């Protein structure tokens, strides 16, 4: 096959890029070694910024998010056993939507199929070659037969364990590790609060999120080496209840735990995001810790910029414009890196924190919720900075 843009990775970034290119009249082929079923049943993020929702609705992917998603006008910050509502609507006139990444994927996949897009899932042994002059993807189908897709440009949307990233020569990588991870669960229980609760406690962080009226998503800070299979439902609920407990008597609604996983936790940036005719987008180029729900939104912001840059490069037969992508994308990436790092360090407990550190952290939280300007800074970052 010959196409204009070959995309490695059919998650939200790859499929949204393919959709935006289609709208601009540019052909693409998307390959992914996972099956559609695997992607649709792997639980990931849950919060969409205002502009992520607009990207889905206004470019013609789907407006299902407006019907099946839940608009959230704020979050609760909980510390010292008290919940404080941060009212995004009142502070910055914006809100976010609770809409799981699995649904974003389903909408994008349906839209690509509806519009005759060439998306190939469940393939194996993908290799990318010729990124400096003549890009080419080869892979094996289910029967083991090899196929080739040659393209003008190739985009790596292949996630945090990206192989495309390894093809960028002479770049730089920025890392930060954290001494903790998140224990994530899905449970069958009613909602415990109308909006998400980000809780700081002496036992560590906890996040109470949601999925549907019957299924909830929750996370709590844990050791990176924690083995989730050794945790009984009882032990999980005791830990979560302890982290949310307070004088107000707040209790979570409990129910059977139907999934448990430990999530990796780190900050990472790759620069540049272009090498020759190869470009990177989403987690392939950067990872943020999950506190603040920036990862998926950042991936969608990348491909919005990238689609524009690719359109110019292909339309004008001018590849110099590809150089503008890294700088444009990284401006937002570093804002999100800071925001995710800030939300993380403001709410998590680190094993070596002193009494001073603990009280300073509480001082920061009290100052934040007492200040309209401080809260507005959180609200701006959480609902998403304006597009460039
Ligand atoms: C969810 C995940 C996050 O990292 C977050 O900050 C908020 C919500 C979620 O999966 O629902």
Image: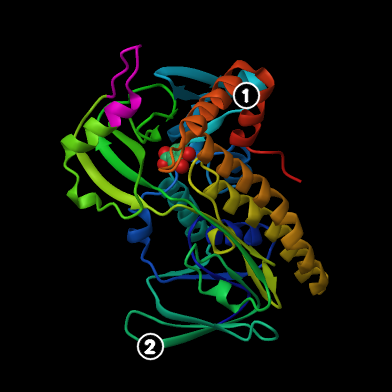
Residue at horizontal 61%, vertical 29%?
379
Question: Which residue position holds label 1?
Answer: 375
Q: Which mark is residue 21?
A: none
Say which element carries label 1.
helix
Judged from the image, the quadrant occupied by ligand 1 is: top left
Q: Which residue is drawn at 52% across and 64% down?
A: 116
- The residue where tag 2 is placed is 145
From where the camera sits, is residue 277 visible? yes
Residue 93, visible in the rendered structure: no
Q: What element carries label 2?
A: loop
Q: Is residue 214 magenta?
A: no
- Give the residues in magenta: 240-252
Q: How crowded is mark 1: few (under 14 residues within 10 Å), some or many (20 or more)?
A: many
Q: In this view, does 319 lie to the left or right of 6?
A: right
Q: Which residue is drawn at 60% across and 34% down?
A: 383
Nearer the observer, 171 or 319: 171
Give the vertical position of 12 relative to 100 (above or below): below
Q: How is the image coloured?
A: rainbow
Q: Nearer the viewer, mark 2 or mark 1?
A: 1
Front residue (pair 149, 46): 46
Q: Where is residue 184 in the image (x, y as percent from the top left)?
A: 33, 44
Q: Which of marks 2 and 1 is nearer the N terminus?
A: 2
Q: Nearer the viewer, residue 340 or 256?
A: 340
């Amino acid at each position: 096959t010959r196409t204009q843009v070959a995309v490695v990775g059919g998650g939200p970034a790859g499929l949204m890029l393919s959709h935006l290119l289609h709208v601009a009249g540019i052909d693409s082929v998307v390959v992914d070694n996972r099956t559609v079923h695997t992607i649709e049943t792997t639980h990931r993020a849950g919060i969409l910024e205002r502009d992520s929702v607009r990207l889905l609705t206004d470019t013609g992917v789907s407006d299902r998010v407006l019907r099946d998603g839940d608009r959230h006008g704020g979050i609760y910050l909980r510390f010292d056993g008290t919940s404080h509502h941060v009212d995004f609507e009142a502070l910055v006139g914006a809100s976010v939507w609770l809409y799981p990444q699995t649904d974003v994927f389903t909408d994008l996949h349906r839209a690509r199929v509806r519009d005759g897009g060439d998306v190939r899932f469940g393939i194996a042994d993908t290799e990318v070659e010729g990124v400096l002059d003549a890009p080419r993807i080869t892979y094996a189908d289910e029967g083991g037969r090899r196929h080739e897709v040659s393209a003008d440009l190739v985009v790596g949307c292949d996630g945090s364990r990206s192989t495309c990233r390894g093809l960028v020569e002479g770049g730089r990588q920025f890392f930060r590790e954290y001494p903790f991870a998140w224990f994530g669960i899905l449970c069958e229980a009613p909602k415990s609060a109308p909006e998400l609760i980000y809780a700081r406690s002496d036992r560590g962080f906890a996040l109470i999120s949601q999925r549907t009226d019957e299924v909830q998503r929750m996370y709590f800070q844990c050791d990176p080496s924690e083995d989730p299979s050794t945790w009984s439902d009882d032990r999980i609920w005791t830990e979560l209840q302890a982290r949310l407990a307070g004088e107000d008597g707040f209790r979570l609604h409990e129910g059977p735990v139907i999934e448990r996983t430990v999530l990796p936790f780190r900050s990472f940036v790759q620069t540049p995001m272009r090498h020759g005719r190869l470009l990177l987008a989403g987690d392939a180029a950067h990872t943020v810790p999950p506190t603040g729900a920036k990862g998926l939104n950042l991936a969608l912001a990348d491909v919005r910029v990238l689609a524009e840059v690719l359109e110019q490069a292909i339309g004008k037969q001018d590849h110099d414009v590809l150089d503008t992508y890294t700088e444009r994308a990284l401006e937002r990436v570093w804002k999100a890196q800071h925001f995710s790092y800030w939300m993380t360090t403001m709410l998590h407990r680190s094993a070596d924190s002193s009494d001073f550190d603990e009280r300073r952290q509480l001082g920061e939280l009290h100052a934040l919720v007492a200040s309209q300007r401080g809260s507005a800074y959180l609200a701006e970052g959480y609902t998403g900075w304006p597009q460039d």
